[in-house]
Image (spheres, rainbow, N blue to C red):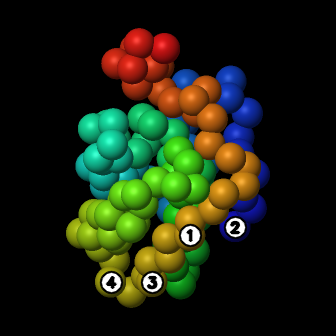
Amino acid sequence: MNASVQPLHLRAAEPFPYSGPDELKGPIEAALRRVSDPEVAMSIVDVGLVYGVEVDHRQVHVLVTATSAACPVIDVIVDDIWHELSRVVPQSLALDVELVWEPPWLPARMSERARQIMGW
């Protein structure tokens, strides 16, 4: 999967790049929205930690990041992603959650709702 991040002006329409069957897009997004970053008590989608999802005939590949390399809860977040996706993805598809550090996370990736909650 290409780790490039979509331009910020596209974030209003799509919370993260998605490539795959239309029928899985909604359930996958809903599953990822159920995963919280425990440090800020917000969805990883609203925080902007999901860089992209690619679904093909073999797997669901999710690119995620953390707000910093020193994030003490990243293992919890990755485990929660696996748990939530396993509830909505067909068992015939492997799950691959890839933690990436490039490009680095920036507060500008947060949704408008998250920025309002954080007072930014």
Disc 4, SS: loop
Q: Residue 112 vs residue 82: left or right?
A: right
Q: Residue 21 vs residue 117: left or right?
A: right
Q: Residue 58 vs residue 91: left or right?
A: right
Residue at 68% across / 47% down in the picture? 104
**Residue receiving disc 1:** 98
Asked whether disc 1 touches disc 3, contact meaning CB atoms under 8 Å apart, the reply is no
Q: Earlier in the sequence, mark 2 or mark 1?
A: 2
Q: Label 3 sits on what residue type?
A: Ala
Q: Earlier in the sequence, mark 1 or mark 4?
A: 4
Q: Earlier in the sequence, mark 2 or mark 3?
A: 2
Assess disc 1: are there few (<14), some (14-19) or many (≥20) residues with their C-alpha within 10 Å of its C-alpha: few
Disc 1 from disc 3: Cα separation: 13 Å
Residue at 40% across / 25% down in the picture? 114
**Residue receiving disc 2:** 1
Disc 3, SS: strand
**Residue receiving disc 3:** 94
Disc 3 from disc 4: Cα separation: 7 Å
- In front of the other: 88 or 7: 7
- In front of the other: 114 or 14: 114
Q: Label 4 sits on what residue type?
A: Gln
Q: Judge whether 102 appears above or below 110 on screen.
A: below
Nearer the camera: disc 1 or disc 3: 1
Nearer the camera: disc 2 or disc 4: 2
